[in-house]
Image (spheres, coloured by chain):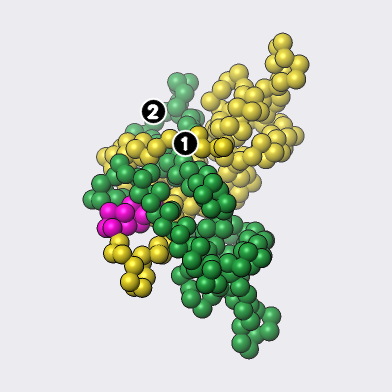
Chain colours: A green, B yellow
Amino acid sequence: MALLGPDADPQGNPAPDPLTKARLRMWLRMLKSTRRVEQVLRERLRREFDSTLPRFDVMAALARFDDGLKMSALSGVLRVSNGNVTGIVDRLAEEGLVVRVQVPGDRRASLVRLTRKGQEVFARQAAAHEAWINELLDDFTPEEARIFSDRFDAVPHNEEETP
Amino acid sequence: MALLGPDADPQGNPAPDPLTKARLRMWLRMLKSTRRVEQVLRERLRREFDSTLPRFDVMAALARFDDGLKMSALSGVLRVSNGNVTGIVDRLAEEGLVVRVQVPGDRRASLVRLTRKGQEVFARQAAAHEAWINELLDDFTPEEARIFSDRFDAVPHNEEETP
């Protein structure tokens, strides 16, 4: 999606700041590229694994914690809403990929963790995901990939702007 | 979100390919940065303009076409579903920011276009959006921003993978 700022039209507005424009263009390309890659990942996860990006994200988060994660922590990791995470976890549990375990000393809290089968399924998906990314970004040399990784850290962390 | 591929754990798996890992890391940072910026934009659009990113995207698309866009073209431009676009356009129309106009010779099709008020509101939002991006990416020099913009074009375009 290309965006026209208000000073992009020749209506007598002040001349655009070339630096501002360069950053805006960078952002729009970055957004577009990210969406393109996500779209390909979405399609391939569906086709090859009958799965989805949010399911993959949930399993990826769980794969990092052998002891499991609370639902609240899990939804904090993801961009999807709490409600969606619950639905995804329910479905993964039905398929035997995750299990809910009681938290000792807290009757109301439970942890979610990958089952053995879940670990195996995720390992295959993660390997495929890594190969897809390698293919999609194969125009980037290792050096470039390293520089880009480092420079992205310059993007500020989430502000706490909620009222 | 950090991802552990299956060869990231010391379980006797094959040694990771450093190039593949560099690209995976680049992708994860790129995704995280994009989401961070989107999160800030979302919060500021809400706070300053009582608006949302999908509304902004719809108005941005319309701002590029003085004669208006068909609903199908509009939803093609956006990542949101057709249903969402319809809801957004309904709401923008109620607020007097867009108007539906009949397509001559096609009774069933209508075009959506910004009203004069919609153009003015969007011009203010686009100026703010541009200033926010300039601030959020202010760690990038113009030269870097230009290089990054060009290199993002190396990310392949959408495949047509739908079955």
Residue receiving disc 2: A15
Q: Amino acid at mark 2?
A: Ala
Q: Amino acid at mark 1?
A: Asn
| Position above or below: B53 against A11 | below
- The region drawn magenta spans B17-27
Q: Dominant secondary structure of the magenta stretch?
A: helix
Disc 2 on helix, strand or loop? Answer: loop
Asked if the stretch drawn in magenta spans residue B20, the answer is yes
Q: Residue drawn at (65%, 59%), measured in percent from left and top?
A: A84
Q: Position of residue A132 (x, y in %)?
A: 40, 48
Q: Residue drawn at (52%, 58%), measured in percent from left and top?
A: A56
Of residues B35 and A70, the one nearer the viewer is A70
Disc 1 on helix, strand or loop? Answer: loop
Residue receiving disc 1: B158
Q: Residue drawn at (32%, 39%), measured in percent from left and top?
A: B151
- A141 horizontally vs A103: left or right: left
Of residues A23 and A73, the one nearer the viewer is A73
**Which residue is most to the left?**
A143
